[in-house]
Image: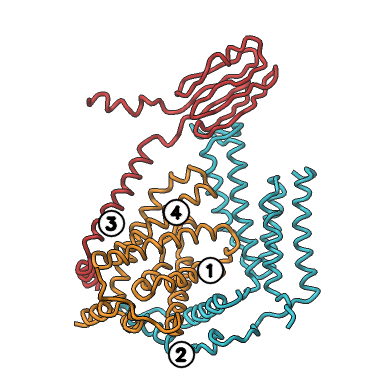
Amino acid sequence: MKYRMQKPDIRIAAGLLMIPAFLLQPGLVVQGLQVFFLIVLAAMHGRKIRVVMITVVLASITAMNLLQENGRVLASIGSFSITLGALLTGLEKAMTLIGMIYLSQYMVSGKPRFPGWFGQLLSKQFLYFEHLVTAWKKPEKGKFIESLDTLLEEMEQGILTDEETGFSDSHSGIAGSRNAGIWDFGKAAGIVIAFWFGSAMGFAGIWP
Amino acid sequence: MIVLIILHTMQKLKPLDVVIAAVASGLVLFLFIRIYSTPAENASVVIRVNEDTWRYSLDIDREIAVPGPLGETFVHIENGQAHVEESPCKNKFCIAAGRINRPGEWIVCLPNEVFIMIEGVMESDGLEVDDIVF
Amino acid sequence: MSSENTPVKRENGIGSEIITKIAILAAFSLFLSTVEYMIPKPLPFLRIGLANLPIMVGLALFSLPEYLILVTLKIAGQGLINGTLFSYIFIYSAGGSLASSLMMYLLYKLFHNKISYIGISLVGAMTSNSVQLLLAQYLLFGSSIWIIAPPFLLMGLVSSILLGIFVNHFTDRSRWYSSALEFTGLYGKRGRDEISHAET
Protein backbone atom coordinates (compact mmCIF):
# COMPACT_ATOMS: atom_id res chain seq x y z
CA MET A 1 0.00 0.00 0.00
CA LYS A 2 1.16 3.46 -0.77
CA TYR A 3 2.38 5.46 2.17
CA ARG A 4 0.04 8.27 3.10
CA MET A 5 1.11 10.91 5.54
CA GLN A 6 -1.05 10.99 8.63
CA LYS A 7 -2.51 14.15 10.08
CA PRO A 8 -0.44 14.23 13.28
CA ASP A 9 2.76 13.72 11.31
CA ILE A 10 2.16 16.88 9.32
CA ARG A 11 2.41 18.98 12.46
CA ILE A 12 5.70 17.36 13.36
CA ALA A 13 7.05 18.00 9.87
CA ALA A 14 5.83 21.60 9.94
CA GLY A 15 7.38 22.11 13.36
CA LEU A 16 10.70 20.67 12.26
CA LEU A 17 10.69 23.10 9.34
CA MET A 18 10.04 26.01 11.68
CA ILE A 19 12.78 25.20 14.21
CA PRO A 20 15.69 26.61 12.14
CA ALA A 21 13.74 29.75 11.31
CA PHE A 22 13.13 30.25 15.00
CA LEU A 23 16.59 29.46 16.31
CA LEU A 24 18.58 31.28 13.65
CA GLN A 25 16.73 34.55 13.40
CA PRO A 26 18.67 37.55 14.62
CA GLY A 27 16.31 40.22 15.95
CA LEU A 28 14.57 40.37 19.29
CA VAL A 29 11.43 41.96 17.88
CA VAL A 30 11.00 39.27 15.24
CA GLN A 31 11.64 36.69 17.90
CA GLY A 32 8.94 38.22 20.09
CA LEU A 33 6.50 38.07 17.20
CA GLN A 34 7.41 34.48 16.52
CA VAL A 35 6.93 33.53 20.15
CA PHE A 36 3.50 35.14 20.07
CA PHE A 37 2.73 33.29 16.84
CA LEU A 38 3.78 29.96 18.37
CA ILE A 39 1.73 30.52 21.52
CA VAL A 40 -1.35 31.30 19.43
CA LEU A 41 -0.63 28.27 17.25
CA ALA A 42 -0.41 25.94 20.25
CA ALA A 43 -3.56 27.46 21.73
CA MET A 44 -5.44 26.96 18.46
CA HIS A 45 -4.52 23.30 18.61
CA GLY A 46 -5.99 22.81 22.03
CA ARG A 47 -3.02 23.54 24.25
CA LYS A 48 -3.42 25.70 27.33
CA ILE A 49 -1.60 29.01 27.56
CA ARG A 50 0.03 29.12 30.95
CA VAL A 51 0.51 32.78 31.70
CA VAL A 52 2.07 32.20 35.11
CA MET A 53 4.63 29.80 33.66
CA ILE A 54 5.52 32.24 30.90
CA THR A 55 5.91 35.09 33.37
CA VAL A 56 8.01 33.08 35.81
CA VAL A 57 10.28 31.75 33.06
CA LEU A 58 10.69 35.18 31.50
CA ALA A 59 11.37 36.88 34.83
CA SER A 60 13.70 34.28 36.31
CA ILE A 61 15.85 33.73 33.25
CA THR A 62 16.14 37.46 32.60
CA ALA A 63 16.99 38.15 36.25
CA MET A 64 19.67 35.49 36.33
CA ASN A 65 21.27 36.84 33.19
CA LEU A 66 21.21 40.41 34.53
CA LEU A 67 23.78 39.32 37.10
CA GLN A 68 26.30 38.97 34.27
CA GLU A 69 26.82 42.64 33.61
CA ASN A 70 27.31 43.41 29.99
CA GLY A 71 26.92 46.75 28.29
CA ARG A 72 25.36 50.14 28.81
CA VAL A 73 23.91 50.77 32.25
CA LEU A 74 20.18 51.47 31.96
CA ALA A 75 19.40 51.77 35.64
CA SER A 76 20.99 50.91 38.92
CA ILE A 77 19.60 50.03 42.30
CA GLY A 78 22.28 50.16 44.97
CA SER A 79 25.22 48.13 43.71
CA PHE A 80 23.06 46.25 41.22
CA SER A 81 22.87 47.58 37.69
CA ILE A 82 20.68 46.64 34.82
CA THR A 83 22.82 46.52 31.73
CA LEU A 84 21.48 46.54 28.19
CA GLY A 85 23.48 43.58 26.90
CA ALA A 86 22.55 41.35 29.84
CA LEU A 87 18.90 42.30 29.52
CA LEU A 88 18.85 41.42 25.83
CA THR A 89 20.69 38.14 26.35
CA GLY A 90 18.29 37.16 29.13
CA LEU A 91 15.21 38.07 27.13
CA GLU A 92 16.52 36.19 24.13
CA LYS A 93 17.21 33.03 26.10
CA ALA A 94 13.86 33.18 27.88
CA MET A 95 11.93 33.79 24.66
CA THR A 96 13.77 30.99 22.88
CA LEU A 97 12.76 28.63 25.66
CA ILE A 98 9.12 29.71 25.70
CA GLY A 99 8.91 29.60 21.92
CA MET A 100 10.41 26.12 21.79
CA ILE A 101 8.00 24.87 24.44
CA TYR A 102 4.96 26.06 22.51
CA LEU A 103 6.34 24.95 19.17
CA SER A 104 6.85 21.53 20.69
CA GLN A 105 3.32 21.58 22.11
CA TYR A 106 1.95 22.30 18.67
CA MET A 107 4.01 19.48 17.22
CA VAL A 108 2.68 16.85 19.62
CA SER A 109 -0.87 18.24 19.71
CA GLY A 110 -1.99 15.72 17.08
CA LYS A 111 -1.04 12.86 19.42
CA PRO A 112 1.49 11.41 17.03
CA ARG A 113 2.00 7.65 17.06
CA PHE A 114 5.57 6.58 16.85
CA PRO A 115 6.29 3.81 14.45
CA GLY A 116 7.30 0.28 15.22
CA TRP A 117 7.87 -1.67 18.33
CA PHE A 118 8.71 1.26 20.57
CA GLY A 119 5.71 3.25 19.38
CA GLN A 120 3.40 0.42 20.35
CA LEU A 121 5.01 0.17 23.74
CA LEU A 122 4.53 3.90 24.16
CA SER A 123 0.82 3.67 23.38
CA LYS A 124 0.52 0.81 25.84
CA GLN A 125 2.10 3.04 28.44
CA PHE A 126 -0.44 5.74 27.67
CA LEU A 127 -3.36 3.34 27.95
CA TYR A 128 -2.19 2.36 31.43
CA PHE A 129 -1.64 6.00 32.23
CA GLU A 130 -5.20 6.85 31.28
CA HIS A 131 -6.42 4.01 33.43
CA LEU A 132 -4.41 5.36 36.36
CA VAL A 133 -5.76 8.86 35.94
CA THR A 134 -9.35 7.65 35.92
CA ALA A 135 -9.04 4.89 38.52
CA TRP A 136 -6.97 6.82 41.03
CA LYS A 137 -8.76 7.76 44.21
CA LYS A 138 -7.50 9.04 47.45
CA PRO A 139 -6.33 6.06 49.49
CA GLU A 140 -7.55 5.45 53.02
CA LYS A 141 -5.26 6.63 55.73
CA GLY A 142 -2.51 4.13 56.45
CA LYS A 143 -3.51 1.95 53.52
CA PHE A 144 -1.53 3.68 50.86
CA ILE A 145 0.49 0.72 49.70
CA GLU A 146 -2.57 -1.55 49.79
CA SER A 147 -4.50 0.70 47.46
CA LEU A 148 -1.45 1.06 45.21
CA ASP A 149 -1.25 -2.72 45.07
CA THR A 150 -4.88 -3.00 44.10
CA LEU A 151 -4.35 -0.60 41.24
CA LEU A 152 -1.19 -2.32 40.06
CA GLU A 153 -2.75 -5.77 40.16
CA GLU A 154 -5.81 -4.51 38.37
CA MET A 155 -3.66 -3.23 35.54
CA GLU A 156 -1.54 -6.34 35.44
CA GLN A 157 -4.47 -8.74 35.40
CA GLY A 158 -6.23 -7.75 32.37
CA ILE A 159 -7.71 -4.33 32.09
CA LEU A 160 -5.73 -4.56 28.91
CA THR A 161 -4.65 -7.52 26.92
CA ASP A 162 -1.95 -7.45 24.32
CA GLU A 163 -4.60 -7.75 21.63
CA GLU A 164 -6.33 -4.64 22.90
CA THR A 165 -3.19 -2.57 22.98
CA GLY A 166 -2.14 -3.92 19.64
CA PHE A 167 1.23 -4.66 21.04
CA SER A 168 1.69 -8.18 19.84
CA ASP A 169 -0.16 -8.20 16.55
CA SER A 170 1.12 -6.29 13.62
CA HIS A 171 -1.89 -4.44 12.31
CA SER A 172 -1.14 -0.95 11.15
CA GLY A 173 -4.51 0.75 11.22
CA ILE A 174 -4.16 3.36 13.90
CA ALA A 175 -7.36 4.53 15.44
CA GLY A 176 -7.95 8.23 15.74
CA SER A 177 -5.60 9.38 13.04
CA ARG A 178 -6.71 10.21 9.56
CA ASN A 179 -4.79 10.36 6.38
CA ALA A 180 -3.88 13.88 5.50
CA GLY A 181 -5.79 15.70 2.81
CA ILE A 182 -4.88 18.64 0.63
CA TRP A 183 -6.43 21.00 3.15
CA ASP A 184 -4.20 19.74 5.96
CA PHE A 185 -1.08 20.13 3.85
CA GLY A 186 -2.20 23.61 2.82
CA LYS A 187 -2.80 24.70 6.37
CA ALA A 188 0.58 23.42 7.56
CA ALA A 189 2.35 24.99 4.58
CA GLY A 190 0.65 28.33 5.33
CA ILE A 191 1.84 28.19 8.93
CA VAL A 192 5.42 27.39 7.92
CA ILE A 193 5.50 30.10 5.24
CA ALA A 194 4.08 32.74 7.56
CA PHE A 195 6.66 31.82 10.14
CA TRP A 196 9.57 31.92 7.71
CA PHE A 197 8.31 35.25 6.38
CA GLY A 198 8.99 36.81 9.79
CA SER A 199 12.47 35.34 9.85
CA ALA A 200 13.17 36.51 6.31
CA MET A 201 12.23 40.05 7.30
CA GLY A 202 14.61 39.72 10.22
CA PHE A 203 17.44 38.35 8.08
CA ALA A 204 16.97 41.09 5.52
CA GLY A 205 17.16 43.68 8.25
CA ILE A 206 13.75 45.08 7.43
CA TRP A 207 12.39 44.17 10.85
CA PRO A 208 14.58 44.51 13.89
CA MET B 1 2.19 4.93 61.68
CA ILE B 2 5.08 7.37 61.50
CA VAL B 3 6.88 5.54 64.29
CA LEU B 4 6.54 2.34 62.32
CA ILE B 5 7.99 3.94 59.22
CA ILE B 6 10.91 5.31 61.20
CA LEU B 7 11.57 1.93 62.78
CA HIS B 8 11.37 0.23 59.43
CA THR B 9 13.70 2.79 57.90
CA MET B 10 16.27 2.29 60.65
CA GLN B 11 16.03 -1.43 60.05
CA LYS B 12 16.63 -1.10 56.33
CA LEU B 13 19.42 1.44 56.57
CA LYS B 14 22.70 0.06 55.29
CA PRO B 15 26.26 1.36 55.78
CA LEU B 16 26.58 2.89 52.33
CA ASP B 17 23.37 4.89 52.84
CA VAL B 18 24.94 6.62 55.80
CA VAL B 19 28.17 7.28 53.92
CA ILE B 20 26.32 8.68 50.91
CA ALA B 21 24.00 10.80 53.05
CA ALA B 22 26.99 12.21 54.94
CA VAL B 23 28.95 12.98 51.78
CA ALA B 24 25.94 14.54 50.05
CA SER B 25 25.01 16.71 53.05
CA GLY B 26 28.63 17.75 53.39
CA LEU B 27 28.73 18.69 49.74
CA VAL B 28 25.55 20.75 49.92
CA LEU B 29 26.73 22.45 53.10
CA PHE B 30 30.06 23.23 51.47
CA LEU B 31 28.26 24.76 48.48
CA PHE B 32 26.07 26.86 50.79
CA ILE B 33 29.13 28.26 52.58
CA ARG B 34 31.20 28.60 49.43
CA ILE B 35 28.58 30.35 47.35
CA TYR B 36 26.91 32.54 49.95
CA SER B 37 29.85 33.58 52.13
CA THR B 38 32.03 34.89 49.34
CA PRO B 39 30.72 38.15 47.94
CA ALA B 40 28.22 37.28 45.27
CA GLU B 41 29.31 40.16 43.12
CA ASN B 42 32.41 39.59 41.08
CA ALA B 43 34.57 42.49 40.10
CA SER B 44 33.26 44.34 37.10
CA VAL B 45 34.69 46.82 34.67
CA VAL B 46 32.96 50.18 34.68
CA ILE B 47 33.46 52.45 31.70
CA ARG B 48 32.28 56.05 31.76
CA VAL B 49 32.12 58.60 28.98
CA ASN B 50 30.50 61.78 30.21
CA GLU B 51 27.04 60.79 31.38
CA ASP B 52 27.02 57.28 29.96
CA THR B 53 28.05 54.21 31.90
CA TRP B 54 28.78 50.67 30.71
CA ARG B 55 29.40 47.72 32.99
CA TYR B 56 30.97 44.39 32.08
CA SER B 57 31.74 41.30 34.08
CA LEU B 58 35.50 40.69 34.37
CA ASP B 59 34.91 36.95 34.04
CA ILE B 60 34.04 36.93 30.37
CA ASP B 61 36.56 37.85 27.70
CA ARG B 62 35.36 40.43 25.22
CA GLU B 63 36.28 43.49 23.15
CA ILE B 64 34.40 46.71 23.67
CA ALA B 65 34.39 49.75 21.41
CA VAL B 66 33.75 52.82 23.55
CA PRO B 67 32.61 55.90 21.62
CA GLY B 68 34.31 59.11 22.76
CA PRO B 69 34.55 62.60 21.19
CA LEU B 70 37.67 61.63 19.15
CA GLY B 71 36.50 58.21 18.07
CA GLU B 72 36.37 54.73 19.45
CA THR B 73 38.57 53.52 22.28
CA PHE B 74 38.95 49.75 22.23
CA VAL B 75 38.92 48.10 25.62
CA HIS B 76 39.75 44.41 25.93
CA ILE B 77 38.79 42.14 28.79
CA GLU B 78 41.02 39.07 28.87
CA ASN B 79 41.68 36.49 31.57
CA GLY B 80 40.08 38.65 34.25
CA GLN B 81 42.07 41.76 33.30
CA ALA B 82 41.15 44.87 31.37
CA HIS B 83 43.35 47.05 29.18
CA VAL B 84 43.07 49.60 26.41
CA GLU B 85 44.03 48.01 23.13
CA GLU B 86 43.62 50.94 20.79
CA SER B 87 42.82 54.60 21.23
CA PRO B 88 42.31 57.53 18.87
CA CYS B 89 44.17 59.88 21.23
CA LYS B 90 47.68 61.22 20.51
CA ASN B 91 49.64 60.43 23.64
CA LYS B 92 48.43 56.81 24.10
CA PHE B 93 48.94 57.02 27.85
CA CYS B 94 45.88 54.85 28.31
CA ILE B 95 47.48 52.02 26.32
CA ALA B 96 50.71 52.44 28.24
CA ALA B 97 48.79 52.18 31.52
CA GLY B 98 48.64 48.42 30.95
CA ARG B 99 46.29 45.93 32.57
CA ILE B 100 44.05 46.45 35.56
CA ASN B 101 42.16 43.84 37.54
CA ARG B 102 41.81 44.87 41.18
CA PRO B 103 38.92 46.88 42.58
CA GLY B 104 39.86 50.54 42.67
CA GLU B 105 42.33 50.39 39.82
CA TRP B 106 41.60 52.64 36.88
CA ILE B 107 42.75 53.86 33.47
CA VAL B 108 41.79 57.18 32.03
CA CYS B 109 42.06 58.55 28.51
CA LEU B 110 41.66 62.28 28.95
CA PRO B 111 41.66 63.31 25.27
CA ASN B 112 38.85 60.87 24.44
CA GLU B 113 37.16 61.38 27.85
CA VAL B 114 37.05 57.64 28.58
CA PHE B 115 37.33 56.53 32.18
CA ILE B 116 37.78 52.84 32.99
CA MET B 117 37.63 51.47 36.51
CA ILE B 118 37.38 48.14 38.28
CA GLU B 119 34.59 47.99 40.82
CA GLY B 120 33.82 45.28 43.30
CA VAL B 121 34.45 44.17 46.82
CA MET B 122 38.05 44.76 47.84
CA GLU B 123 39.92 41.51 48.33
CA SER B 124 41.15 42.70 51.72
CA ASP B 125 37.56 42.88 53.00
CA GLY B 126 37.33 39.13 53.16
CA LEU B 127 40.79 38.71 54.66
CA GLU B 128 40.64 41.12 57.57
CA VAL B 129 39.29 38.62 60.09
CA ASP B 130 41.97 36.12 59.20
CA ASP B 131 44.64 38.80 59.43
CA ILE B 132 43.72 39.45 63.04
CA VAL B 133 43.48 35.80 64.03
CA PHE B 134 46.76 34.65 62.56
CA MET C 1 30.10 -11.74 44.75
CA SER C 2 26.92 -13.46 43.66
CA SER C 3 27.90 -15.95 41.03
CA GLU C 4 25.30 -18.48 42.14
CA ASN C 5 22.56 -15.92 41.54
CA THR C 6 22.73 -16.02 37.79
CA PRO C 7 19.71 -14.51 36.12
CA VAL C 8 17.08 -16.90 34.90
CA LYS C 9 17.25 -17.06 31.12
CA ARG C 10 14.11 -15.94 29.39
CA GLU C 11 12.87 -17.29 26.15
CA ASN C 12 13.07 -15.23 23.00
CA GLY C 13 14.03 -11.89 24.42
CA ILE C 14 11.62 -9.90 26.54
CA GLY C 15 8.41 -11.71 27.32
CA SER C 16 5.06 -9.98 27.16
CA GLU C 17 4.58 -10.20 30.95
CA ILE C 18 7.79 -8.27 31.41
CA ILE C 19 6.70 -5.76 28.80
CA THR C 20 3.45 -5.31 30.72
CA LYS C 21 5.36 -4.66 33.93
CA ILE C 22 7.60 -2.15 32.20
CA ALA C 23 4.62 -0.35 30.71
CA ILE C 24 2.81 -0.28 34.06
CA LEU C 25 5.79 1.23 35.84
CA ALA C 26 6.36 3.70 33.01
CA ALA C 27 2.69 4.72 33.19
CA PHE C 28 3.04 5.17 36.93
CA SER C 29 6.04 7.38 36.40
CA LEU C 30 3.99 9.49 34.02
CA PHE C 31 1.14 9.64 36.49
CA LEU C 32 3.48 10.76 39.28
CA SER C 33 5.02 13.43 37.10
CA THR C 34 1.57 14.91 36.51
CA VAL C 35 0.93 14.72 40.26
CA GLU C 36 4.20 16.55 40.82
CA TYR C 37 3.21 19.07 38.21
CA MET C 38 0.14 19.94 40.27
CA ILE C 39 2.13 20.58 43.44
CA PRO C 40 2.75 24.33 43.57
CA LYS C 41 6.41 25.33 43.49
CA PRO C 42 8.16 28.68 43.59
CA LEU C 43 10.15 27.90 40.46
CA PRO C 44 9.10 25.61 37.64
CA PHE C 45 12.63 24.24 37.59
CA LEU C 46 12.42 22.79 41.08
CA ARG C 47 11.62 19.11 41.10
CA ILE C 48 10.79 16.64 43.80
CA GLY C 49 11.46 13.71 41.53
CA LEU C 50 8.33 11.68 42.26
CA ALA C 51 8.52 10.27 38.75
CA ASN C 52 11.70 8.45 39.72
CA LEU C 53 9.90 6.18 42.18
CA PRO C 54 8.90 3.60 39.53
CA ILE C 55 12.40 3.77 38.08
CA MET C 56 13.83 2.76 41.45
CA VAL C 57 11.21 0.06 41.87
CA GLY C 58 12.35 -1.32 38.52
CA LEU C 59 15.99 -1.65 39.60
CA ALA C 60 15.62 -5.13 41.03
CA LEU C 61 13.05 -6.32 38.52
CA PHE C 62 14.68 -5.76 35.18
CA SER C 63 17.83 -6.48 33.25
CA LEU C 64 19.76 -3.52 31.89
CA PRO C 65 18.04 -3.45 28.46
CA GLU C 66 14.62 -3.75 30.09
CA TYR C 67 15.49 -1.08 32.59
CA LEU C 68 16.67 1.22 29.80
CA ILE C 69 13.36 0.69 27.99
CA LEU C 70 11.58 1.76 31.16
CA VAL C 71 13.74 4.88 31.45
CA THR C 72 13.27 5.74 27.78
CA LEU C 73 9.51 5.31 28.09
CA LYS C 74 9.49 7.62 31.09
CA ILE C 75 11.49 10.30 29.26
CA ALA C 76 9.52 10.04 26.01
CA GLY C 77 6.17 9.87 27.81
CA GLN C 78 6.92 12.99 29.82
CA GLY C 79 8.03 14.79 26.69
CA LEU C 80 4.78 13.90 24.96
CA ILE C 81 2.50 14.72 27.85
CA ASN C 82 4.13 18.02 28.74
CA GLY C 83 4.53 18.78 25.06
CA THR C 84 8.22 19.44 25.47
CA LEU C 85 9.40 16.53 23.35
CA PHE C 86 10.74 18.78 20.61
CA SER C 87 12.00 21.62 22.78
CA TYR C 88 15.23 21.79 24.62
CA ILE C 89 13.52 21.45 27.98
CA PHE C 90 13.52 17.87 26.78
CA ILE C 91 17.33 17.75 26.59
CA TYR C 92 17.36 19.03 30.13
CA SER C 93 15.00 16.44 31.56
CA ALA C 94 16.32 13.60 29.39
CA GLY C 95 19.91 14.34 30.39
CA GLY C 96 19.07 14.37 34.08
CA SER C 97 16.95 11.23 33.93
CA LEU C 98 19.38 9.23 31.87
CA ALA C 99 22.44 10.11 33.94
CA SER C 100 20.71 9.48 37.24
CA SER C 101 19.09 6.20 36.24
CA LEU C 102 22.37 4.83 34.94
CA MET C 103 24.09 5.86 38.18
CA MET C 104 21.35 4.20 40.21
CA TYR C 105 21.59 1.04 38.16
CA LEU C 106 25.35 0.89 38.56
CA LEU C 107 25.11 1.47 42.28
CA TYR C 108 22.45 -1.19 42.64
CA LYS C 109 24.41 -3.73 40.64
CA LEU C 110 27.64 -3.13 42.53
CA PHE C 111 26.46 -2.68 46.09
CA HIS C 112 22.93 -3.98 46.48
CA ASN C 113 23.87 -5.75 49.71
CA LYS C 114 25.38 -2.68 51.29
CA ILE C 115 22.92 -0.05 50.20
CA SER C 116 19.19 0.58 50.55
CA TYR C 117 16.99 2.69 48.30
CA ILE C 118 17.78 5.76 50.42
CA GLY C 119 21.39 5.82 49.26
CA ILE C 120 20.45 4.95 45.70
CA SER C 121 17.82 7.67 45.61
CA LEU C 122 20.28 10.21 47.02
CA VAL C 123 22.91 9.48 44.42
CA GLY C 124 20.28 9.55 41.68
CA ALA C 125 18.97 12.93 42.79
CA MET C 126 22.43 14.45 43.15
CA THR C 127 23.43 13.16 39.70
CA SER C 128 20.35 14.43 37.96
CA ASN C 129 20.47 17.79 39.75
CA SER C 130 24.12 18.35 38.84
CA VAL C 131 23.54 17.41 35.21
CA GLN C 132 20.54 19.73 35.07
CA LEU C 133 22.46 22.59 36.67
CA LEU C 134 25.24 22.20 34.11
CA LEU C 135 22.76 22.08 31.23
CA ALA C 136 20.88 25.06 32.64
CA GLN C 137 24.12 26.99 32.86
CA TYR C 138 24.87 26.46 29.18
CA LEU C 139 21.34 26.67 27.83
CA LEU C 140 19.59 29.28 29.92
CA PHE C 141 21.12 31.06 32.82
CA GLY C 142 24.83 31.50 32.42
CA SER C 143 27.13 30.99 35.39
CA SER C 144 24.84 32.91 37.75
CA ILE C 145 22.79 29.70 38.00
CA TRP C 146 25.15 28.63 40.80
CA ILE C 147 23.58 31.22 43.06
CA ILE C 148 20.45 29.09 43.26
CA ALA C 149 22.36 25.80 43.22
CA PRO C 150 22.55 25.26 47.03
CA PRO C 151 18.80 25.42 47.78
CA PHE C 152 18.12 23.43 44.60
CA LEU C 153 20.49 20.68 45.74
CA LEU C 154 19.22 20.82 49.32
CA MET C 155 15.69 20.28 48.09
CA GLY C 156 16.91 17.29 46.05
CA LEU C 157 18.70 15.94 49.12
CA VAL C 158 15.64 16.07 51.36
CA SER C 159 13.12 14.88 48.80
CA SER C 160 15.32 12.03 47.62
CA ILE C 161 15.74 10.73 51.17
CA LEU C 162 11.95 10.74 51.56
CA LEU C 163 11.54 8.96 48.23
CA GLY C 164 14.14 6.41 49.29
CA ILE C 165 12.28 5.75 52.54
CA PHE C 166 9.11 5.23 50.58
CA VAL C 167 10.71 2.81 48.13
CA ASN C 168 12.24 0.83 51.01
CA HIS C 169 8.80 0.57 52.48
CA PHE C 170 7.04 -0.19 49.22
CA THR C 171 9.43 -2.94 48.12
CA ASP C 172 8.95 -4.66 51.47
CA ARG C 173 5.20 -4.40 51.74
CA SER C 174 3.80 -4.49 48.25
CA ARG C 175 2.16 -7.71 47.09
CA TRP C 176 2.49 -6.63 43.50
CA TYR C 177 6.21 -6.03 43.91
CA SER C 178 6.94 -9.34 45.60
CA SER C 179 5.09 -11.30 42.99
CA ALA C 180 6.81 -9.31 40.26
CA LEU C 181 10.16 -10.03 41.86
CA GLU C 182 9.34 -13.70 42.02
CA PHE C 183 8.18 -13.72 38.46
CA THR C 184 11.05 -11.84 36.85
CA GLY C 185 13.36 -13.89 39.03
CA LEU C 186 16.40 -11.97 37.84
CA TYR C 187 18.26 -12.80 41.00
CA GLY C 188 16.68 -16.16 41.60
CA LYS C 189 17.53 -17.10 45.16
CA ARG C 190 18.17 -13.61 46.42
CA GLY C 191 14.81 -12.41 45.24
CA ARG C 192 13.03 -15.31 46.92
CA ASP C 193 15.03 -14.88 50.14
CA GLU C 194 14.03 -11.30 50.38
CA ILE C 195 10.37 -12.15 49.90
CA SER C 196 10.36 -14.84 52.56
CA HIS C 197 12.25 -12.51 54.84
CA ALA C 198 9.64 -9.81 54.36
CA GLU C 199 6.85 -12.22 55.16
CA THR C 200 8.23 -13.35 58.52
Label 2 Cα neighbours within 10 Å, binned few <14 / some 14-19 / many ≥20: few
> Circle 4 sits in a helix, a strand or a loop, which is it?
helix
Q: Which mark is residue B20?
A: 3
Residue type beneath disc 1: Ala
State which quadrant residue B14 falls in.
bottom left
Q: Which residue is mark 4?
A: C131
The CA span between labels 4 and 1 is 18 Å
The CA span between labels 3 and 2 is 41 Å
From the top left corner, tell me how far across and down residue A129 is, in percent.
50, 78
Residue type beneath disc 4: Val
From the top left corner, tell me how far across and down residue C96 is, in percent.
45, 59
Question: Which residue extends farthest top?
Answer: B91
Q: Which residue is mark 1?
A: C76
Do marks 3 and 2 share a chain?
Answer: no
Residues tagged 4 and 1 counted as in contact (Cβ below 8 A): no
Image colour assigned to chain C: orange
Q: Residue at x 66, y 60 (%)?
A: A39
From the top left corner, tell me how far across and down residue C182 is, in percent.
31, 83
Residue type beneath disc 3: Ile
Label 4 Cα neighbours within 10 Å, binned few <14 / some 14-19 / many ≥20: many
